[in-house]
Amino acid sequence: MKEQLKQISTNCYMLVNNNSGVEIHIYLNRSLFESFEEEESIQQLYNASLLPGVASPVVGMPDIHTGYGLPIGGVMATDYENGVVSAGAVGMDINCGVRLITTKIFMDEMDKNKLKKILDAISTRVPSGVGKSSAVKHLRKPPLEAIASEGAGFFIKMGYGWKEDLERIEDGGCIKGADASCVPTTAQNRSDQLGTIGGGNHFIEIGRVSQVFDGEIASEFGLHQGFLYVLIHTGSRGFGHQICTEFSRLMWDHAEKTGTRAPVKGLACAPIFSGDGQDYLKAMACAANYAFCNRQLITHFVREAFVEVLKKSETDIGLNILYDVAHNIAKKEKYGSKWLLVHRKGATRALPAGHDANPSIFYRTGHPAIIPGSMGTASYVVIGTPEIKKTFCSVNHGAGRVMSRKKARSKFTKEDLLEQVKNVVITSKNISTLLDEAPMAYKDIDEVVFTLVEAGLTKPVAKLKPMAVLKGEGEEA
């Protein structure tokens, strides 16, 4: 289908679904377009454009690659009154997202030995790897009703964080409308993973601000060149995965009754105001709040680890949250005069300056969108421009894979991986288990980020370079 794509503006290619009239827009620069071989991901966007009530355009981000139903790096908006909700178009790891923490530590104050000690101190508190349960016993049976109604604020009241953290989390760390009673029993049985990062591409990273593009905004964000930061990338773990699995099956089984038969099972859907649709949205919100709680607990443990190793107070070290934003979510948002349900799967919201839905502290600048790369390259902080509404205020969520996990494991050796990550300190019981996360399995993060910059949709604020990484081992399931 690649040959059917026509360039319509800088770094934007279009395909029109003649059956529905819905446009499909994919953002790629010339280099990414020429090397693009993900024909299946274009077909997945096309399939999404066939769903009832889909708004034009369906969007592919520059990190697009094939996923389940909707591609990762896909954005699909549906009419809120007459459209559908699709569990697969949100994704398995509901509210997988990234939290960025700033510090007052200059890079020269840190060496590899200290970095390793901090990672070790974090890893004793934060289990990593597929299926791992919470290190703290009482977190293995979390109060799902309280998580649904209060989100991250519940654990902050228990001492896992600071009150001011909440104003720097999307939706204040609590999406409204969550209902734990809508969560399937099979998912409730997998709610023992709070305070863990899991596997796949999830991580905790310590690095330095390597480049500042906008000094005024970067300073306002607390991003100063040469100073350390911490990134936390994880989501709702097995809890969210099971919710997606159960509701995808339910929506598919009930498709004849609801009149919403999707072209593929991965896009199984239901009318937003049907029983299945409402139950899913309430369960999804519960999983999203669980993910906010997960990253909040990890933040607390990261702060403890820094204090333990550096023998300084949290005030002296900094460790302030800049922002925490989801990239697997469906949200009710208004565009023009229309309310839409925007599904973002492997895509990050980036509300521009002046947007009413911004947290008040980011109203003047627009809130930061945090885009992690691979563990050996770089990450970025960007903001959306007024033009970002063309993508329903969405940007890419990372670099995007160019190589499947299976292919990466067969292609790269332990020595290859160590060469690609160069001087980055990595904590892992067996580094050979991380071959599928080798930097060369991913697209060039610089090209991916600047695809949207050149298209006029985003503005770069700062570039971040990793120095030490605690990586999740194993493929998420």
Image (cartoon, grey):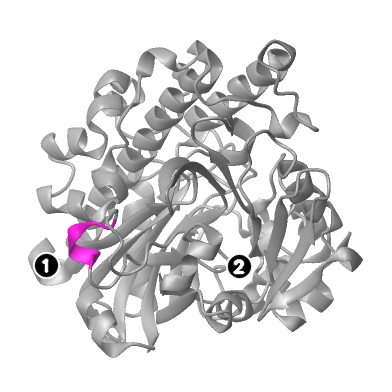
Q: Which residues are magenta?
A: 358-363
The location of residue 434, given as percent across then percent down, is: 64, 57
Q: Is residue 89 above or below residue 303?
A: above
Q: Which residue is mark 1?
A: 312
Instruction: Determine which of the numbered discs, if any, sits on residue 399 in the image.
Output: 2
Count all numbered tags in the image, as a single digit: 2
Disc 2 to disc 1, C-alpha distance: 35 Å
The location of residue 60, given as percent across then percent down, is: 66, 59
Decide: few, some or many residues near mark 1? Use Cα within 10 Å; few <14, some 14-19, many ≥20. few
Residue at left offset 40%, top offset 36%: 288
The location of residue 38, given as percent across then percent down, is: 82, 60
- Say which amino acid is labelled 2: Ala
Q: Is residue 207 magenta?
A: no
Identify the mark nearer the N-term, 2 or 1. Answer: 1
- Say which amino acid is labelled 1: Lys
Quarter where residue 181 is shown? top left
Residue at left offset 70%, top offset 64%: 26
The location of residue 268, given as percent across then percent down, is: 69, 28
Outermost residue on the front side: it is: 337
